Amino acid sequence: MKLLRVGAPGEERPAVRAEDGRLLDLSQVTSDIDGAFLASGGVDRARAAVKAGELPELDPEGLRIGAPLARPGKIVCVGLNYRDHAAETGAAIPPRPVVFMKDPGTVIGPYDEVLIPRGSVKTDWEVELAVVIGQRARYLDGPEAAWDVIAGYAISHDVSEREFQLEYSSQWDLGKSCETFNPLGPWLVTADEVGDPQDLGLHLSVNGVKRQEGHTSDMIFPVGHIVSYLSQYMVLEPGDVINTGTPAGVALGLPGTPYLRPGDSVELSVDCLGAQRQTFGQA
């Protein structure tokens, strides 16, 4: 099932994208798609309402698509998690996941404008698979236990400012937490529909030029391992998001480092999870 939120910023309503492409209003089932909805069996309730034909149809004309999940409790990110990306940046393959946090307030809709920060000269792109947690997780007993706590997956654009990230601090958070730096969506696709998260292609183009063409099978640490590993050090709550890393092809690793400028457009997609498109503006 594909869950989404539609409407103006701050006024989104929950919806379902039916198999035939129609948008169905989920407001009678829940007031929002958030951690409380996921933790309380909301996905099953939504599925039952769709099957019963109880949901009114929404007219998609001119309707903004917001992030499919209301503001996450936290965004946990894994860096250098694709072998080819580690190689292009000159980094060694990490023996353990490289973990950092990203401000949840960076989340915006998949087609919203992304703002290049004031003073930025190294704003970069990163297409990623996002894991959305559906049940509380602490001290999971290995990767197999992770599947019980994953609600689904979405496309995440982990926009990064490399100077802020790598030159201004020993921590990465400064370059990851600028406003609008995490377009998410268009859908939260439930785990049962996605199937194997290690069998998804990732794609990104800038101004029509293909820059990233990767596959989740190239992850150093697969999804189950990441979720289980993180649960040993922090409690994962329903509605939390995990950004699982990006493949090669970022500006940082390309000849001439063609960082983003105002007016640039980025299109990205992940198999089974839809597509995003953003135009970049100036903060």
Image (tube, rainbow, N blue to C red):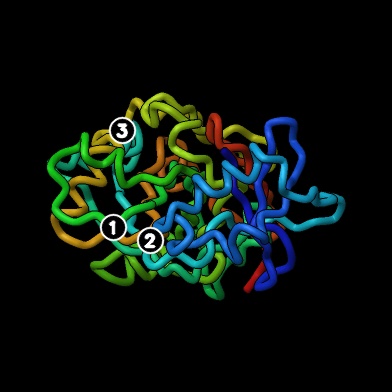
Decide: few, some or many residues near mark 1? Use Cα within 10 Å; few <14, some 14-19, many ≥20: some
Residue 85 marker: none
Q: Which of the two labelled residues, at mark 1 and mark 2, occupies the earlier sequence position?
A: 2
**Residues marked 3 and 1 touching at CB (< 8 Å):** no
* Residue annotated with mark 1: 136
Q: What residue type is labelled 1?
A: Arg
What quarter of the picture does the C terminus occupy? bottom right
Q: Is mark 2 on a helix, strand or loop?
A: strand
Question: Can residue 156 be seen here?
Answer: yes
Please report the residue visible at 56 percent of the width from the left and 66 percent of the height from the top: 180
**Percent position (x, y) of residue 221?**
24, 37
Q: Which of the two labelled residues, at mark 3 and mark 2, occupies the earlier sequence position?
A: 2
**Percent position (x, y) of residue 115?**
61, 66
Q: How far apart are marks 3 and 2 (CA)?
A: 19 Å
In the displayed structure image, the side of residue 128 where residue 59 appears, left or right: right
7 vs 37, nearest the viewer: 37
Please report the residue visible at 24 percent of the width from the left and 54 percent of the height from the top: 137
**Percent position (x, y) of residue 147?**
30, 38
Question: Can residue 164 be seen here?
Answer: no
